[in-house]
Amino acid sequence: MHIDIDRFSNINSQFHKWDERYKIISILILIISFSVVKSFYLVLTIPILALIMVTISRLPLYFVLKKLKLTLIFFLPLFILLPISSGGEIFYLIVGIKIYKIGLHLAISIFLKAISILICIMIMFGTSRFDRTIKAFYHLKIPEKLIIMILFTYRYIYIYMENLRKLNVALFLQGFKKTSNLRSILVSSSLIGNLLIRCYDQTEMVYNAMILRGFNGKLISQFRFKASKTDLFKAIIIIFISLLIVGLEIII
Amino acid sequence: MINKALEINNLTFSYPDKEKVINNISFELNIKDSLAIIGPNGAGKTTLFYLISGILKPFGGSIISLNKAVKYKEFNRNIGFVFQNPDDQLFSSTVYDDIAFGLINIGYSNDDIDKKVNNILNRLSYRNLIDRPSQHLSAGEKRMISLAAVIAIEPEILILDEPTSHLDMRSRRMLIQFLKETHITKIIASHDLEFLLELCDKTLLLDEGSIIKYDNTNEIMTNEKLMTEHGLEVPHSIKSKI
Amino acid sequence: MHISEGILPPTISIGGYIVSAVVTGITIKKVSLDDVPKISLVTAAFFVSTFIHIKLGPTSIHLTLNGLMGIILGISSFPAILVALFLQAVLFQHGGILPLGINVFCFGIPALISHYLFQFTFTKFKAKLLLIKLIGGLSGGLAVAISGVMLALVLIMSGKEFTTFAYFFAWTHIVLMFIESLLTFLVLNFILKVKPELIKSSKLTL
């Protein structure tokens, strides 16, 4: 599974050139404004805005779509249940099952908002190197311990994914096939136990490595962010659009 | 008075499930010496390194490095230890951050850190990797970058544990070249005897926690009886000459 | 299963962030900077473990393991869950950023409950390993069930249209409870056999 959210962080676009601190704040405000929208017709405009943004970001569409694919599976139960259970005005009758207008609107609304928000988040994290974006959060007053946890966890996820992949290959080569039986659950529990134990041993070594290089509490290298007027200008544009959306929602 | 790089006296250590992993070891090392440590698996090579670098606390005996006693879990800038597994040592988000880590702890200014990181990467011709996250490095690159991270703090003594494992021929050659050009005291444990032959004048043969022989590399590695007795073989390049 | 993007009204999203921020603030103060790398690695291991799917008939489910996280990481399991859910949202688009506060709260609090339950059992019945493992397993399942109920309540608060979905959500979690109980028990069994220090070590269990 490819984790590389920042795989295209080295291409060039207005989003790529944007100072990460301003980018984060602006996009956060934007997605909050998306979540405020309830009126159906305004909701329909949100994905258009998201598509414009992703075009400006030059992130390849196949990359964005691929990442969205899996999320849609998680939405399926919601999309089936909401239209048939929300109550209210009936929209349609299929084979005796009532499709309610409110439920249907809500399901479509949620779907469109979700996709748009996810696209914005992909832009936020996909147009800069991951560690830069996280270090920007530090400059936005997120506690240092959390930032370090995110960076470390991120770093070692790759290694453990590799470990898991190799363990699975070993199982496959020994003819193991996952089925719904107790043995499979036993094997899975051993995999998890194995991962945790190997990881525990590694924590000792990593800690030693840190002490051997003089670790004394400081963990974030001074990352220098420098903003320009363009960064502020872009922020103002996005925030203005956000306020516009909220304003329209209030009026409509 | 000449400083000894390392003075080890009557060193002993046991693990909870294994007795006398290091069994009363004594030896000395001069500054700028290159020492190879060889022996079968389980001989105690890595444990010895942990003790010398202060990661483990000896049960008995003393370790003195450049006239200073080695203290348990205390940062000793003079000793640099490159682990067998680079993933245990490259824990930062980027190559730059990993190399800068030690330098930040020592207290260098941001500009000095910049200069030193660039210097060492240029020496390795790896300047292009400076912003790369460690997970995107090949095995050879990881090995060289973990070496760079340790060398960056400019230790007087460099310890390397199985440095050529997982390296392809090119990276191995690069490592040999780099170590030849780095004129500090070196202690290298390896199964790659040809590698050790090229780099180390002195060799310590370790088995079951005891020193079997401490002599010139040639003396030990040409001794077929000695080598085979302790689970090793005479290196190919020498065999053909005998 | 966490709540995905687009569902929660902003008031609830922000409310979730506020409560999670408060609990994170409290729990992270107890974590020393020295322990941060260790906790992070274990978090990474848990993160990857959730990719180990269990096959159940025609579907596969992926595990939550918040109960087990509570047992192994102790109080630091709350910020650890925050980090794990954040990375899940950003790297894999599971869950989401706006519902992050709510998701963290609903998975984190049961993790803490698991921790205290296990801690209590462990100190009171030190030698009775089987009992410890059983209670551990049960608390693993309990954590998932509580999470499901909490999330279902949040869904109902978000709008009465979500009621049926909320019930579906809660019931799914209650069913998952049995599998997670079994799995937590088995993993605890494995660890106590192979490396008991992981659980008994005061380094990780704060």
Image (cartoon, coloured by chain):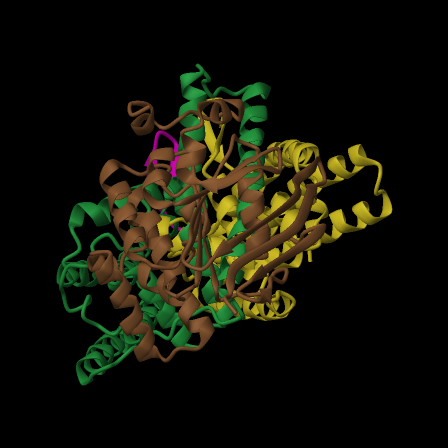
Chain colours: A green, B brown, C yellow
- Is residue A99 shown to the viewer in this render? no
In the displayed structure image, the side of residue B76 where residue C136 appears, left or right: right
Q: Quadrant of residue B138?
A: top left
Which part of the image, by quadrant, shows the N terminus of chain A?
top left
Is A169 or A112 nearer to us in this picture? A169
Q: Quadrant of residue B201?
A: top left
In the picture shown, does residue C172 fall above or below A151?
Answer: above
The residue stretch that appears in magenta: A89-98
Which part of the image, by quadrant, shows the C terminus of chain A?
bottom left
- State the image coordinates of residue B15 (x, y, percent, origin top left): 68, 41
Write the residue at 42% across / 32% down.
B221
Q: Is residue C65 magenta?
A: no
Write the residue at 59% across / 61% down.
B64
- State the image coordinates of residue C117 (x, y, percent, origin top left): 75, 49
In the displayed structure image, the side of residue C76 where residue B82 appears, left or right: left
Q: Main secondary structure of the magenta part?
A: strand
- State the image coordinates of residue C190 (x, y, percent, origin top left): 65, 32
- State the image coordinates of residue A237 (x, y, percent, origin top left): 20, 78
Identity of the residue furthest to the bottom in this view? A229
Write the residue at 65% across / 48% down.
C72
Q: Is residue A96 magenta?
A: yes
- Is residue B84 shown to the viewer in this render? yes
In the displayed structure image, the side of residue A200 where residue A121 appears, left or right: left
In the picture shown, does residue B231 fall above or below B96?
Answer: above
In the picture shown, does residue A199 fall above or below A234?
Answer: above
